[in-house]
Image (spheres, helix red, strand yellow):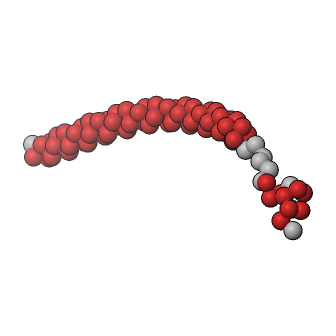
Amino acid sequence: MERWMEGEEAAEEELRLLEAMNTVSTAVQKLNQVLATLNRRTVELSKELGTAERQLSAVNDGTNATMSVPTIAPMATPEAQRTEL
């Protein structure tokens, strides 16, 4: 009888361990789903950020092109140089 009790306790312990492993496995699967969703969203945001950076760069290039009109300093003209001499 005692030997049968030991076997039953071992079987119950094994069942508890299997249930615990199942719980851990389920939690890992849920975490994996969350991480996959997070990864997809990160890729989407990265693409959106790249697009926004290109658009901002184009706007800045357009602004810089209109702001960087060359100006001629009065001292650079031949008349100004002659009058100084």
- Which is nearer the eye, 82 or 65? 82
**24 displayed left or right of 5:** right
- Which is nearer the eye, 79 or 1? 79
Q: Residue at x 9, y 43 (%)?
A: 1
Above or below for 57 versus 82 = above
* Outermost residue, bottom side: 85
- Which is nearer the eye, 61 or 26? 61
Above or below for 10 versus 77 = above
Q: Residue at x 77, y 48 (%)?
A: 71
The picture places residue 53, in percent across and down from the top left corner, at 61, 38
**15 displayed left or right of 6:** right
The picture places residue 21, in percent across and down from the top left corner, at 31, 40
Residue 7 visible from this viewpoint: no
Count of marks placed on residues: 0
Q: Residue at x 16, y 43 (%)?
A: 9
Q: Toward which corner of the image does residue 55 lie, by quadrant?
A: top right
The picture places residue 18, in percent across and down from the top left corner, at 29, 38
Above or below for 26 versus 76 = above
Q: Residue at x 41, y 33 (%)?
A: 34
Above or below for 82 versus 54 = below
**70 displayed left or right of 17:** right
**41 displayed left or right of 31:** right
In which quadrant is the C terminus drawn? bottom right
Residue 21 visible from this viewpoint: yes
